[in-house]
Amino acid sequence: MIDLKRALNPTAPITTEAEAVAAARASAIAIFLGVLWGVVGVIYLMTAGQAVMDAAVAQATAQNPDAAGMAGMMAQTALWMSVGFVVIQAILGFVQWSKPNIVIPIIFAILVAFGLVSGVLGQMMAGQEGMPEAAQTPMWQIWGSFIIMAIELLLHITGIRGASKLDKLRMAAAQNY
């Protein structure tokens, strides 16, 4: 059994196939971490977040009465899209765990980096004129997201390194066979 702390370290040297597989699976661990955080977000949307979404809909309706019917439908769509994305993420996590590859960690590293950048830019824009007050995300969710995404980014980088080394080791073994 590979030492988990060593396998999750993005700077640890990878020399064997077992270490490469463990490092590639770090990306799956990051995906599962994102799934757990996504479940927390869905639970929030279904409970206290519903009131926040209703307030945002009311504010949008007050500004534009024609949007009243569409706003309620968009709130439900947001909830079901969140559930769908969590399910897709879980499936990709299982794929990465069972058959480590380099494509999934690269895609998720790009998505996480985009999430970090857009989250920072969103916080820079918060409080500016024209930004709705009712639609603001709670601070615990914002900071939790930043922390989770930073951890995920490190784990995806480890996953990319592990999958790359795994490909190289398997190619070298196939050529020596």
Image (tube, rainbow, N blue to C red):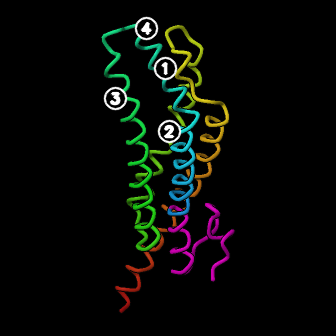
Q: Which amino acid is tagged 2?
A: Gly
Q: Position of residue 155 (x, y in %)?
A: 57, 58
Determine whether label 1 and label 3 are within 8 Å by CB.
no
Per the image, label 2 sits on a secondary structure element best described as helix
Assign the C terminus to one quadrant of the image: bottom left
Front in this rendered view, residue 166 or 151: 151
Where residue 1 appears, as percent x and y from the top left, is 63, 83
Q: Residue at x 59, y 25 (%)?
A: 123
User: Which residue carries the number 1 mark?
Assistant: 56
**Disc 4 target residue:** 62
Locate residue 52 relative to residue 72 in the image: left or right: right
Residue, disc 3: 73
> Reading the chain from its start, which is encountered first: label 2 or label 3?
3
Q: Is the residue marked by circle 4 packed among few (<14), some (14-19), or many (20+) residues within 10 Å?
A: few
Q: With 79 as the anchor, is 133 left or right in this view?
A: right
Name the spot of residue 106 as percent of width and height, x first. 43, 54
Q: Would you say the residues marked 1 and 4 are in contact, meaning their CB atoms lie under 8 Å apart? A: no
CA–CA distance in space, label 3 to label 4: 16 Å
Between disc 1 and disc 2, whose residue precedes? 1
Which residue does the numbered mark 2 point to in the structure image? 115
- Nearer-the-camera pick, 47 or 37: 47
Range of residues picked out in magenta: 1-27
| Residue type, label 1 | Ala
Furthest residue to the bottom? 177
Query: Which one is in front, 166 or 89?
Result: 89
Amino acid type indicated by mark 3: Met
The answer to whether mark 1 and mark 2 are in CB contact below 8 A is: no
Callout 4 amino acid: Ala
User: Whole-percent x and y of residue 170?
Assistant: 41, 80
Badge count: 4
